Image (cartoon, rainbow, N blue to C red):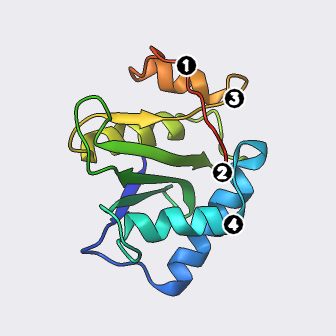
Amino acid sequence: MLKFKTYNPNTKMSTLEKLNATEFLFKHLEQYGDEKPDIERSVQYALKEIPSFGGFILEGYDENANVVGTVVINRTGMGGYIPENILVYIAVDNSQRGKGYGKDLMNKAIELCEGDIALHVEKDNPARFLYEKVGFTNPYLEMRLKK
C-alpha cells in the first residue's frame, strides 16, 4: 500500500524536493516525457510559483519510504467544456512497474481533484490502458498548431 505526500501552493516543496521530483519525472517518463525545463515549469505552475491557477504534485512512497511515483496536476481556471484540471505528468519508477502503483497514484490524484480532468497521451503509450481502466475516455481528436 502506497503512502502519499501532496504539495500545493499552501504546502510548498523545498528546492531539493522540486529538483528530485523533476529528475524523477524526467527519468521515468522515458520517451513519453518532456525536457527538464518544461517539467520544472509544470511543477512551478502547480505550486503557483509562476502566474497560474495552481494545482498539486502527488508523490507515492513504498513501505521503505522510497518514491515510486509522481503526478503533476495543473488547474486550468476553466470548467465545463474545458476541464478544471490537466494531468500533466504521471510516472512510476521503471523498476517498480506492474505492482499497481500507477493505478493507486491515478486514483489518489482523481480523489484530490475538484472537477473534471483532462490528459494527453500518445496513442502508443502503454499507460493509455491504465487511463481507460480508471474511467478516462477519448471523445476528441486533439490537434495543435505550433507557432
Disc 2 crowd, CA 10 A, few/some/many (<14, 14-19, 20+): some
Q: Residue at x 65, y 39 (%)?
A: 97
Alpha carbon separation for disc pair 3 and 4:
20 Å
Q: Quadrant of residue 106?
A: top left
Identify the mark at residue 141; answer none if there is no mark.
1
First in sequence, mark 1 or 3: give its number.
Answer: 3
First in sequence, mark 2 or 4: give its number.
Answer: 4
Residue denoted by label 4: 36
Q: Residue at x 24, y 74 (%)?
A: 10
- Helix, strand or loop for disc 2: loop
- Eye-nearest disc, 1 or 3: 1
Q: Are marks 1 and 3 in contact (CB under 8 Å)?
A: no
**Amino acid at dot 3:** Asn
Alpha carbon separation for disc pair 4 and 1:
27 Å
Disc 3 crowd, CA 10 A, few/some/many (<14, 14-19, 20+): few
**Amino acid at dot 2:** Asp
Along the horizontal axis of the image, is 134 left or right of 70?
left
Q: Quadrant of residue 105?
A: top left
In this view of the protein, can residue 94 be seen by the observer?
Answer: yes
Residue denoted by label 2: 93
